[in-house]
Amino acid sequence: MADASHFYGKFAQHAFNGTADLDGGSLIAILLDNTYTFDADADEFIADLNGEVTDASYARKVLSGVAFSYDAATNTVKFTSAPFTFTGLAATWRHMVLAISTGSDATSPLVKCTSHDVDKTSSGADVTYTPNAAGLGTAIAN
């Protein structure tokens, strides 16, 4: 099985009704262990997640350089960010979730989940995620 990345179902609803602001909000990355199971329909807010990494070396990361672009030739909207690093991470995780922090887990909408096919482990090393050239996410307008 290959790594998979999926948007949460309620994200589009939040984006269209204004409760999720990718452009002005704080996009954050959260690591979850293998006890979490992605559910596009049931999971809506950070508070709905389980299995967040608890090691003292771990902290949620606020992404910088979040940007949007539109490619008229392909009718594709892309969003991306600068690379980000979990510094000195000593933990095991299987999923990375992107969410928009409102300051409260109960109202912070989930955006996207990337699930790895096996656990990832770091023993105190820096773990850097560099967004794919295609972006953190894309949408096709048609």
Image (spheres, rainbow, N blue to C red):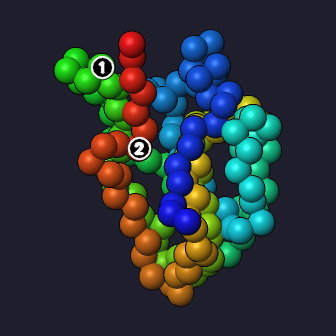
* Quadrant the N terminus occupies: bottom right
In the current view of this chain or complex, which residue is farthest to the left?
73
Tell me the quadrant of the picture where the C terminus can be found.
top left
Looking at the picture, which amino acid does disc 2 mark? Leu
Report the Cα–Cα distance between label 1 and label 2: 17 Å
Crowding near the residue tagged with mark 1, few <14, some 14–19, many ≥20 C-alpha atoms within 10 Å? few
At x 59%, y 73%, the residue is 118
On the image, the x and y values in percent for residue 16 come to 57, 14
Q: Say what secondary structure mark 1 lies in.
A: loop
The answer to whether residue 60 shows anywhere in this view is no
User: In the drawing, does residue 57 fall left or right of residue 3?
Assistant: right
> Residue at point 52% right, 49% down?
5
Q: Residue furthest front?
A: 1
Indicate the amino acid at tag 1. Answer: Asn
Q: Which mark is residue 86?
A: none
The answer to whether residue 21 is above or below residue 52 is above
Q: Position of residue 57 (x, y in %)?
A: 59, 75
Q: Position of residue 43 (x, y in %)?
A: 75, 40
In the image, 34: left or right of 132?
right
Q: Does 132 appear above or below 2?
A: above
Note whether 58 is above or below 70 in the view shown. Answer: below
Disc 2 packing (10 Å; few <14; some 14–19; many ≥20): some
Q: Residue at x 30, y 43 (%)?
A: 134
Q: From this viewpoint, is residue 118 visible?
A: yes
Residue carrying label 2:
136
Q: Disc 1 designates what residue?
A: 75
Q: Is residue 63 left or right of residue 5?
A: left
Q: Residue furthest bottom?
A: 123
| Residue 40, x across and y down, in percent | 70, 39
- Relative placement, left or right, of 128 versus 105 is left
